Image (tube, rainbow, N blue to C red):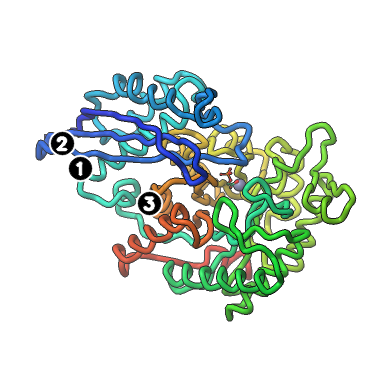
Amino acid sequence: MNLYLEIVDVHGREILDSRGNPTVEAEVTVKSNRDGWLYTGRAAVPSGASTGQFEAVELRDGETRYRGLGVQHAVKNINDKLKSALMGKNALTQVYIDRILIETDGTINKENIGANATLGVSMACARAAAQALHLPLYRYLGGINTQQLPVPMMNILNGGKHASNTVDFQEFMIMPLQAENFADGLRICAEVYHCLKRILHNKGLSTGVGDEGGFAPDLPDAVSVLDTIMEAIKTAGYKPGSQICIALDVASSELYHEDTGMYHFPGESSLTGQEVVRDTSEMIAYYESLLERFPIVSIEDGLAEDDWDGWKQMTKRLGDKVQLVGDDLFVTNVKRLDAGIKLNVANAILVKVNQIGTLTEAFEAVEMAQKSGYRAVISHRSGETEDTIISDIAVALNAGQIKTGAPCRSDRVAKYNRLLRIEEELGTASKYFDIFAAQRK
Ligand code: PGA
Ligand code: ZN
């Protein structure tokens, strides 16, 4: 008898995310034809702040409640349209389920049903199936080859749209490349984070945190932030450049002004008292100078989401020295990724499941990346929930890197703690290694 996990209920509700804004939670209940039991999978949808222009649509009510941010329409779409489309279907056929979600919406960017509605159901369906199979989610999603724990790309200092300080780059992250295992890497990062807190405090700077739990002091520019992070790494007793390297998310689409065709730095401008702007080639030269001074192994969204020519130049100049990650550029979309691969643009993709709206499509993006020699970094959003599915996805796909914020705030820490449990569960079958070892030789 083939296993049939019949979908017997689909339910959506409005919950809150880590910024106190509404988001979608979905539940899918299945009945197994093997044991006759019911299993319910639940999943919550994250939400970005520096959202890419080409992302699938996050349906918001636009009414007075929650300042327009309510998701009651998306929830209703789950409880009506998606439920009736899925009732009786086999939850084990994730690709088919996701295709039904895509077809029920019927648009290319999911503006009809909402990518928040489709993603919630897609993820809850996978969870219900994993539960009915009595498998951990990562094992269900990844199969027997699931073994690699990701290196954390840990955000310890926030700027840009994630904080109200003067730092223009959105994220400064550390990567514990030579740790013994994931747990050891996490410990190292947390130690550096605490050293950074002390250093900022001693300098009379704020130790308040931004949306992803990293500190958000008023430092004047990227160089002063990087100097402070280097000091924190050394004070914690680690060697920058070997044990710990640095990653940046510039989120430069937020700095780019269409009218001037330039990148504007509002924080740097306010502190220096004169307008600081850079054009595309100055941005690339700026990164080149930062790469010479600091052990940076990865730069995300170094140029804006539509600056394809700029990305080509940047990849040519920096692509063999540093990982260049496309977030707003690729938006977890195989069409944009395919275009990028053909143009030789970037060499890695950031994967945010809610940018595209189903698990299948996100997995396709990772597969396309990996087959083309691009790396994939599995990522949270700045607005998160207690849902830890990205930890399971990172391990399932052997992605090797995860971006999930600071070791601070439970919405971030929950993902790290989930990875600790997975590593323990995998035991000697788990792997953790310096994914940049070849690049840094
Ligand atoms: P977002 O930020 O979730 O606000 O888009 C995360 C990122 O840019 O990587
Ligand atoms: Zn980003």
Task: Assign the N terminus to one quadrant of the image.
Answer: top left
Q: Can you say whether 221 is above or below 254 in the image?
A: below
- The residue beneath circle 3 is 392
Does residue 390 lie above or below 62 as drawn? below
Q: Which mark is residue 32?
A: 2
* For marks 3 and 1 on the same chain, the one whose residue lies earlier in the sequence: 1
Residue 108 position (above or below residue 122): above
Mark 1 in CB contact with mark 2 (< 8 angstroms): yes
Horizontal and vertical percent position of residue 93:
29, 33
State yes or no: discs 2 and 3 in contact (Cβ < 8 Å).
no
Q: Sequence-wise, which precedes: disc 1 or disc 2?
A: 2
For residue 327, side relative to residue 141 (left or right):
right
- Location of mark 1 (residue): 132
Viewer-side residue, 343 vs 300: 300
Q: Viewer-proximal residue, 58 or 324?
A: 58
Q: Work out which residue is located at the far right of the displayed protein and give it.
A: 274
Residue at image position (60%, 59%) is 208
Q: Which quarter of the figure has residue 307?
A: top right
Q: Is residue 298 visible?
A: no
Residue type pointed to by label 3: Asp
Residue drawn at x 64%, y 50% is 163
Using the image as rendered, state which of residue 417 and residue 87 is in the foreground. Answer: 417
Whether the residue under disc 2 has CB within 8 Å of ligand 1? no
